[in-house]
Amino acid sequence: MTTIMITGAGSGLNNGAAIELARRGHDVIACVENYPQHRALEIQAKEQGVALRIEKLDVTREGDRKRAISWDVDVLVNGAGIIEGGALVDIPDENVRRQFEINVFGPLQLTQGIARKMVARRSGKIVFMSSVVGILSGPFVGAYGASKHALEGIAEAMAMELQEFGVEVATINPGPYLTGFNDAGFLATRNWNDDPSQRVFDYDKLSFPFEQFEPSIVFNAIADVIVGESGLYRNVVAPELADSVREQSMQVWTRKSTDGLGTRFPLVQRSYDLQPETPVGSG
């Protein structure tokens, strides 16, 4: 039995992965941000007939991190995160800082403490839940994408640094899944501390610019990466996306800065055209 700690397990893909890993017989420490999520996950686990150790862990709180670092885990999955929607020209500084505090700084500080214990025993695995936009990017998800690019840099460096100590590092790069996470990020603009009249974009007219997959299809794939059945360092877990992501990531070498200048970028137009929570194949 492997002990796996997953942060951000109160909802979304991390929640589904935690349930799947427990179903497979692993000892899962499912970490949630707050106590309402704690209770909801208790009920969910009981309904699913799985055993979970549920812990309250807000990765931005030093006390929570210290307590979590004291636990003995074989695999750490850094899943906690938020998405702050909005154009980078508009999004307030405090929202960008919050994006990085939750998605980058908190997870890094948690990982540092747990990684030291793995180094001492010469074994362990660290998984960073990144995103396809940690490899590429997109309009109105730039702050989120920047935080995931930062995680990608952290993961790659850490993989090199910890290799000699027998500590494995991997990334999981989901595409867009219909968990409510992506669309919720576009509600953040309603509470910005700014002057709406000074914004470049009208966010009442915009939605998340990608069609989204049904999430239940990916829980097994995420669990496979966590327990080592994939073996890859980078794992794009979205149907038929890996090849196109790889191809698009290479286009930056030939794209010119003047391409399309003065015209609306296609993905920006998609943000106008799509309705919230648009499933793949219907947009």
Image: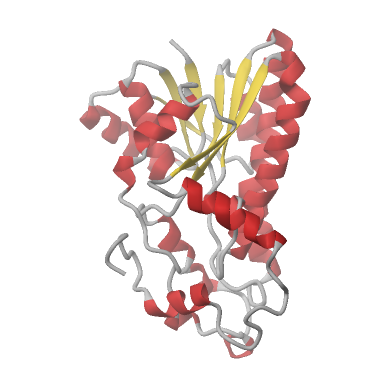
> Residue at the spot x=55%, y=22% of the render?
75
Residue 133 higher or lower than 260, as above or below: above
Q: Does residue 53 appear to the left or right of 92 in the view shown? A: left
Tell me the colour scheme of the image. secondary structure
The x and y percentages for residue 226 are 49, 27
Locate residue 86: give its quadrant: bottom right
Q: Quadrant of residue 14?
A: top left
Q: Tell me if 154 is positioned left or right of 191 in this view.
A: right
x then y, percent, for residue 7: 51, 35
Where is the C terminus found, in terms of image quarters?
A: bottom left
At horizontal 70% and vertical 36% (from top left) the residue drawn is 156
- Of 154 and 44, nearer the camera is 154
- Residue 251, above or below 122: below
Check the picture and name the quadrant holding the N terminus: top left
Say which of 29 and 278 sits in front: 278
79 w.r.t. 146: above or below: above
Q: Residue at x 29, y 30 (%)?
A: 45
Say whether residue 235 is visible.
yes
